[in-house]
Image (cartoon, rainbow, N blue to C red):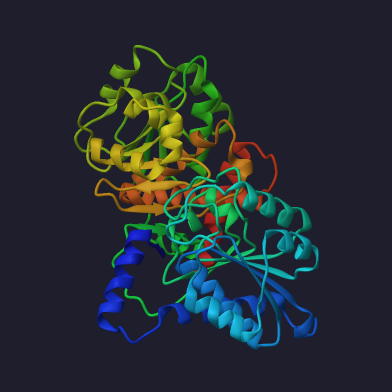
Amino acid sequence: MIPVHTAQEIRDAEEAFFAARPEVDLMRRAAQGVSRSAQEMLGDDAPASSQSVLVVVGAGNNGGDGLFAAADLAAADLSVTVWPVTEQVHEAGMAAAITAGCTIIDAIEAARQLPQTALVIDAVYGLSGRLGLDQVLATFAAEVETLRVPVLAVDIPSGLQTDSAVLPEHCLRATRTVTFAAHKPCHVLKPAATACGEVEVVDIGLTMPQPTLWQASESDIVRRWPLPGPTSHKYSRGVVGIDTGSARFPGAALLGTIGAVHAGAGMIRFVGPEQAAGLVRHQLPSVTHGEGAVQAWLLGSGWGQTEANRDRLSARLGPKVPAVIDADALVTLPDTLPPNCLLTPHAGELSRMLNVDREVVEADPLTHGRMAAERWNSVVLLKGATQYVIKPEGVVLLAVPGPYWSAQAGSGDVLAGICATLLASGLPACDAALLGASVQAMAAARRIGPWPPDVIGREVASVVGEFTRYW
């Protein structure tokens, strides 16, 4: 798991470091990481003297990092120009850059030189950066993209906000981002993360606290997946009860059941309406129909918005059986849910659960996901380009990301079925959500293109089957 730290956590760690080791220059350490990464990006294909680097610097410490990096690059015989975008600059950094032979230019000269520039280093805004760019920087950023000039961002790409997932209209998109001590939220939360390129973390010696945000990798999913053993049988692997679908939305029931079957459910009992049951019988003959004991429920997918939903939900929720509660059931939640339940809203559903506008949720998904997890004392899997798995105590795990083709009707139904299988296997709701969302993303990555969600759901079986090679 990759730890992710907020801007304030980084600031606190820096203050603690300065108090303990005031003689150490963290800015120089950071600058050395930037200059090394810049030289890697430039490569060895051309003589150093012909490699033109443009360093765009702001007024704060981020600008200081860029200026000291510019001095290092000029000392390595690279042709380095510096464009200060503000009158105020880091004085010691500017003195070092000038002494090393850097040329100081203005916005007009920066635009003129851009077509001949091999690399732009973005050192305008750092931890305290604001969303968006002013008109001059926005025009420059657009021209950088048009000319496809590689960009190395220092800490975060200018235009992003450190702790935000928001991607503003204007930002300086990076080919690579060099950040210090730890990943920041904008490096991993989409859509903002799409502007960061490859993210490289440079260790500058800070001691970081235990994070509340983690990014999962594929290896984490492989290690945690519950594989059957020699003593396994259908009941020990987990019996999933599925009450989904309606006359209007029978397909949702089939899709969720496809997800449950291909994630490895030991047994499935389908108890949804007959219109949905007929589809399930036709395509999935291993599924049983009728009441019986289950280890977890899948509820809500395809119910439609009806007055009967509250009673339908309460009839299935018992004190000892956890449930994946999806879609239309989410707006009829009781005040108290059974232990180990998993709620699977997208932003629109979460907005209705919390009675706020969808745009408010999309602007700050972490805060609102945490509100719901605390409100219902349940794990929340907030679906979207980034899939947030949020525990009631506020710890957040990010699922392995997948391709954007997955944003289609029915994907959430399949995901709910996968999670229900994992919940029935005995996993905590947090692990069921993390593994379910991640394995669906991994299956989608094997089927790049507009494959329908039922195809991706069936592909999950192949992905899970490959996990055995690592055990």
Q: Position of residue 287 (x, y in %)?
A: 47, 34
Q: Where is residue 413 in the image (x, y as percent from the top left)?
A: 49, 33
Q: Where is residue 57 in the image (x, y as percent from the top left)?
A: 57, 66
User: Given the current orientation, which residue lies at the most extreme front position?
Assistant: 87
Q: Is residue 407 above or below residue 86?
A: above
Front residue of 14/471: it is: 14
User: Where does the N terminus fall, quadrant-wise?
Assistant: bottom left
* Residue 265 seen in the current view: yes
Which residue is drawn at the image coordinates 51% and 37% (left, top)? 414
Left or right? Give the position of 401 relative to 431: right
Which residue is drawn at the image coordinates 39% and 25% (left, top)? 271
Give the number of marks.
0
Q: Position of residue 58 (x, y in %)?
A: 53, 63
Left or right? Give the position of 55 relative to 25: right
Left or right? Give the position of 207 relative to 93: left
Which residue is drawn at the image coordinates 53% and 33% (left, top)? 255
Front residue of 434/312: it is: 434
Q: In this view, does 23 lie above or below 90?
A: below
Q: Is residue 193 above or below residue 20?
A: above
* Residue 231 seen in the current view: no
Front residue of 139/292: it is: 139
